[in-house]
Amino acid sequence: MARAIMLQGTGSDVGKTVLVAGLCRAAKKRGLKVRPFKPQNMSNNAAVADIPGDNNHGGGEIGRAQWLQAIACGVPPSVHMNPVLLKPQTDVGAQVIVQGKVFGEARARDYQALKGRLMDAVLESWGKVGEGADLVIVEGAGSPAEINLRSRDIANMGFATRADVPVVLVGDIDRGGVIASVAGTHLILPQEDRRMIVGYLINKFRGDVSLFDDGIKAIEKFTDWRCFGVVPWLKAAARLPSEDSVVLERLASGEARALKVAVPMLGRIANFDDLDPLKAEPQVEVVFVPPGKKLPADAGLVVIPGSKSTIGDLLKFRENGWDRDLAAHRKRGGHVVGICGGFQMLGRMVRDPDGIEGSVTEAEGLGLLDVETVMEPEKTVRNVTARSVPFDLPLEGYEIHLGRTTGPDTRRPSAIINGAEDGAISADGKVIGTYMHGLFGADGFRGKFLESLGIKGGGLDYRAEVERALDEVAAELETHLDCDAIFSLAR
């Protein structure tokens, strides 16, 4: 079995995902065979990964974060890197994915009772991930300080104690109160859990790191834990795909550029990292529009992203008045792209006769494409290679969706995937719908698409940019953390 170390946070969104990715890349550069692992993740930003030994399945779902961490390790992503994935559908319920496949749906209270049954799957995947590896770097979820959930925990100390994996605690100084959060975690953890922690690190420090020297002394006084270092604000992290919608609340519009792309922030937004390659383009400004705000009138392109709850988000779309903004955008000659759930919303009607998404079984669409969608129980999950029909250029991405879309506009497909037509295009060519995630990641297509909007694009190798960002994060961690000590404590 490979040696392992685990990063847990004093809270959610303390930067564990990027730190694990950076440490994975640092370990790889040292010549180690390293793998990522996250027992349980909650995110609608999913990726498609291989299901080892299942040659008849198109692929399985894992959190996008573990997909990124696999890239950092230089290995293909596997469903065993994230054996339990929760995809929120409502405020109180989520779809449960186990080892890449849909396990069922559960309300929050029911899921707490279900977790005990899922530990076997977590430990099975844990064994598979470690095969042939020198080191596994594990990412926790939320915080071990949520002791009210400890009895059935599979994501933090429940896993660490069962698998005997030492823990490094991560505190986020940017949100304030970091001394109290680290010391408070030490205070409330039971002895069995506290003994698993071998030290801590401080993340997201702005300014002169030496100014926190007294803070380190204070934490040592309360906890007797060693400090592995203070990590500065990692600018390169902004060039990496974001894991979940928590980050959307902090996204602000950047400087004005030649093309403004407006993206409505749907309540169950999914796979919004589809927009990352556009954000990386120097002539493109991507603006995420929160509920209650109008879609900007000066946007040249509106992208409606994926959704985990198409009908629910479609109803909210209208409540926000975004349907009127979108109609005005089209009247001005603006372009629209709908991806996955966004594609379904662009049609005339979305029907869910089996109530797969919830109690509302149909909703009128936005009417920008002459198509209709019917939700069906079987889920399409696969990586794909494809070709853009309007630009005759290669595409590469993935599909994760329910539903079948038909109608006259599908006779103008947006892509050919595995020999089959996908998506739809309006008669004037300005509204495009597709089920394919990741299409903007194809450099050639992205360049030609931007040219069609009158913008100079292309020349950017997006995947190479992600690789460079991972290298930069790893270099920063080598500078500011005692990586030798962290890796040596793995067992």
Image (tube, grey):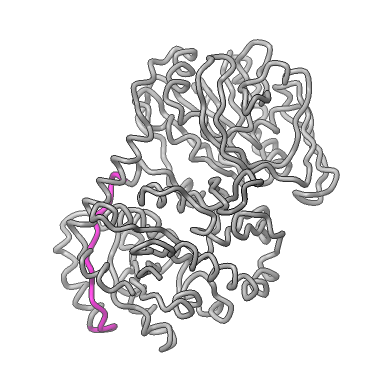
Magenta residue span: 221-236
Residue with the most extreme right position: 353
Q: Position of residue 364 (x, y in %)?
A: 79, 32
Choose between 432 and 398: the one closer to the eye: 398
Quadrant where the image shows the C terminus: bottom left
Is residue 401 in the magenta section? no
Q: Position of residue 200 (x, y in %)?
A: 29, 72
**At 33% across and 47% down in the image, what residue appears?**
237
**At 54% across and 55% down in the image, what residue appears?**
79
Q: Is residue 128 above or below residue 198?
A: above
Number of on-image labels: 0
**At 44% across and 75% down in the image, what residue appears?**
160
**At 28% across and 74% down in the image, what residue appears?**
489
Left or right: where does residue 146 sit relative to residue 254?
right
Left or right: where does residue 30 sit relative to residue 458?
left
Choose between 320 and 23: the one closer to the eye: 23
Quarter of the image where one finds residue 468? top left
Is residue 230 in the magenta section? yes
Q: Is residue 206 above or below residue 266?
A: below
Q: Position of residue 317 (x, y in %)?
A: 66, 37
Quadrant where the image shows the N terminus: bottom left
Q: Is residue 129 above or below residue 110?
A: above
Left or right: where does residue 95 sit relative to residue 199?
right
Choose between 148 and 392: the one closer to the eye: 392
Q: Position of residue 325 (x, y in %)?
A: 62, 26
